[in-house]
């Protein structure tokens, strides 16, 4: 179960990194700090997949980017699926 717990922990850490990225988008100056750059590099590959096919909504003079919401929902299902499959594999090989 060590492997399963480790993978679950990595998913949880990435979940919080995604949350940090969303919060940082509300304060653009944070993105230019060392911490912000690391968060950006870790999350941009994942979030950009969703931004590519979910255009921002126009709201008067601004835009609302819904792609992070869809990315969070997808991440939830990816996490559950991955942990279920990994758990099944580990159970069947006797670990």
Image: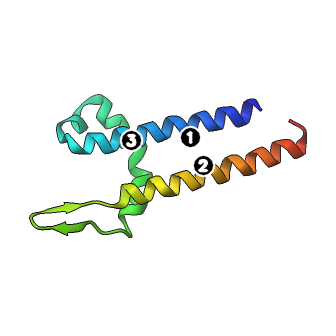
Circles 3 and 2: CB atoms closer than 8 Å: no
Rounded to the nearest whole Å, what is the CA distance between mark 3 and mark 1?
Answer: 13 Å
Circle 3 packing at 10 Å, graded few (<14), some (14-19), many (20+), is some
For the residue pair 30 and 15, the one nearer the viewer reads as: 15
Q: Is residue 51 above or below residue 35?
A: below
Rounded to the nearest whole Å, what is the CA distance between mark 2 and mark 1?
Answer: 7 Å
For the residue pair 76 and 94, the one nearer the viewer reads as: 76
List the single residue furthest toward the left.
61
Mark 3 or mark 2: which comes first in sequence?
Answer: 3
On residue 19, the disc is 3
Q: Secondary structure at mark 3?
A: helix
Image position of 53 (left or right of 60): right
Q: Quickly name the residue at label 2.
A: 79
On residue 11, the disc is 1
Colour mapping used in the image: rainbow
Image position of 32 (left or right of 35): left
Q: Residue at x 49, y 39 (%)?
A: 14
Image position of 86 (left or right of 18): right
Circles 3 and 1: CB atoms closer than 8 Å: no
Q: Position of residue 51 (x, y in %)?
A: 35, 62
Q: Position of residue 11 (x, y in %)?
A: 56, 40
Mark 2 or mark 1: which comes first in sequence?
Answer: 1
Q: Residue at x 32, y 30 (%)?
A: 35
On residue 44, the disc is none
Within the image, what quadrant is residue 27 found in? top left
Mark 3 or mark 1: which comes first in sequence?
Answer: 1
Q: Secondary structure at mark 1?
A: helix
Circles 2 and 1: CB atoms closer than 8 Å: yes
């Amino acid at each position: 179960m060590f492997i399963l717990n480790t993978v679950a922990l990595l998913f949880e850490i990435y979940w919080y990194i995604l949350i940090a990225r969303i919060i940082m988008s509300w304060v653009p100056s944070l993105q230019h700090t060392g911490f912000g750059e690391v968060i950006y590099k870790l999350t941009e590959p994942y979030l950009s997949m969703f931004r590519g096919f979910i255009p921002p909504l126009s709201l008067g003079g601004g835009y609302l980017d819904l792609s992070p919401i869809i990315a969070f929902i997808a991440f939830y299902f990816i996490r559950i699926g991955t942990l279920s499959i990994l758990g099944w594999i580990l159970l069947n090989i006797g670990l």
